[in-house]
Image (cartoon, rainbow, N blue to C red):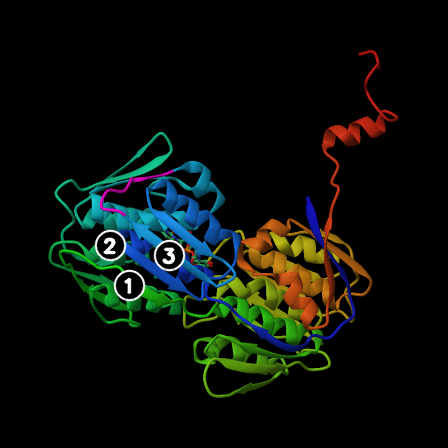
Amino acid sequence: MEAFRIQGGDRLKGTVSVPGAKNSVLKLMAAALLAEGTTVLRNVPEILDVRIMCELLRRLGCGIDYDPAAGRVAIDVPAEIGHRADYELVRAMRASICVLGPLTTRLGAAHVALPGGDAIGSRGLDMHQAGLEALGATVRLDHGYFIAEAPEGLRGTEVRLEFPSVGATENLLMAATLARGTTVIDNVAREPEIVDLCTMLARMGARIEGIGSSTLSVTGVERLSAVEHRVVGDRIVAGTWAFAAAVTGGDVTVEGVDPAIMTTVLEKLELAGCRISTGEGETFRVEGPERPHAIRVATLPYPGFPTDLQPFVVTLNAVSDGLGMLTENLFEARWRFVRELARLGAQVSIDGRHAVITGVGELSGAPVEASDIRAGAALVIAGIVASGITEVTGVDHIDRGYERFAERLRALGARIERVAYEQRSLEELADLADGGGREGTSS
Ligand code: UD1
């Protein structure tokens, strides 16, 4: 097992570049399934989730040529592809369900393992299911698999999403590209990653109107063709660096993301006392204050404040000069990391969807565990501002979404290293309690 070991007390300074967005590239890779031929993606981040998606596509019969150093992946999609996404992969990465739409529309069948914790018809995949059914597919659950079938192909319809779900928008959009007739999807998510997907699909030959708005109208075509596409920059990673500057009182220039897609985030950072400078193109600079002011944030679908930056808001408020508030409107169980942050001395109280955070003068380093990608990165940043040493375990979560995280932090002046971490199992602890080993002890 590995951990990030951080010696706290540094202000981050310098320039950092941001690769393509995780939440875009995974969907673009799935969209490649819609067309026979070789799709080439550039600005691909070097993260674990891309490797998982490569494996998923490989098992469906695609040829994959992934060059992480060059940020390029070529996906060669043959005429015949498989229709099954295994549990092993979907469990490792929930976003694997984005192959559902492409497989159902192209093959007339998709068998995709259900991600843990979800059941058909319950919160989680109900909008995916209802949308595919409206498009003419039959959907059922069989031995843990979500099975969608449409042997005659999908047909255009009108769908209104209950909530602008990112995943449901993407699956239905991709499904509609090869359906017969026109599909109008109302109340869709408008995240920049969805605009990126629409842009690539349009280049492949899809007929889409309303890109970037709440209603997408998609007229199905016979076939799509493989294209080359550059992945949009990762606004969540860019936001991570922006908050890192704000929390540590640093001065960080972020390259690779258009600040226009981060307006809500940058406005909140200004309220926290940061100076934000935006120049021409895909760059902006964040100069953090000596100590941030507390901010009030409610997470919302884009263009609202992104839920994925929520742990950074809590971290900023934890070291602020006042009383901060956070309301989580998208995910219910996103508070696990707060318990870990409390180990560093943060004062947070939770009531349902709301967290009230009282700023403290200083956090103090301690061992903590990352429970997901963003929580992990936020704990690392908390470790940089804390006194003494913080060890963050669960680094593989961070690897899922951040390319060379420690290396980039070191370049900005943080003292962080990746170390082997020995975590004893309960059995080993029991052995210790028994005085060094149970072997030979009578029962
Ligand atoms: C995507 C992002 C994730 C981000 C989230 C919200 C990827 C790989 N992940 O996740 O980082 O935090 O958008 O911006 O792109 N819901 C239902 N029924 C459905 C679908 C969703 O109830 O059929 C609920 C979910 O349980 C959740 C909320 O809607 O509470 C948001 O989910 P959704 O927008 O679909 O997020 P994801 O696509 O899973």
Side (left or right) of 299 relative to 424: left
Q: Which residue is mark 3?
A: 74
Rendered residue at 65%/75% (across/down): 245
Q: Dot 1, how many residues are within 10 Å of its Cα: few (below 14), some (14-19), or many (20+)? A: some
The residue segment tinted magenta is 78-85
Q: Which residue is mark 1?
A: 227
Whole-percent x, y for residue 137 in the image: 20, 44
The span from disc 2 to disc 1 (Cα, nearest Å) is 9 Å
81 within the magenta span: yes
Viewer-nearest residue: 178 or 369: 178
228 within the magenta span: no
Please determine whether, in this image, residue 194 is positioned above or below residue 436.
below
The span from disc 3 to disc 1 (Cα, nearest Å) is 10 Å
Circle 2 sits in a helix, a strand or a loop, which is it?
loop
> Which of the two labelled residues, at mark 2 and mark 1, occupies the earlier sequence position?
2
Image marks 3 and 1: residues in contact by CB distance under 8 Å = no
Residue 291 seen in render = yes
Viewer-nearest residue: 240 or 28: 28
Dividing the image into 4 quarters, which one contains the N terminus?
top right
Q: Which mark is residue 35?
A: 2
Circle 1 sits in a helix, a strand or a loop, which is it?
loop
Circle 3 sits in a helix, a strand or a loop, which is it?
strand
Please determine whether, in this image, residue 244 is positioned above or below residue 94.
below
What count of labels does the image hold? 3
Side (left or right) of 308 relative to 214: right
Principal secondary structure, stretch drawn in magenta? loop
Viewer-nearest residue: 422 or 442: 422
> Which of the two labelled residues, at mark 3 and mark 1, occupies the earlier sequence position?
3
- Whether disc 1's CB lies below 8 Å from ligand 1 is answered no
Quarter of image, ligand 1: bottom left
Whole-percent x, y for residue 304 in the image: 44, 71
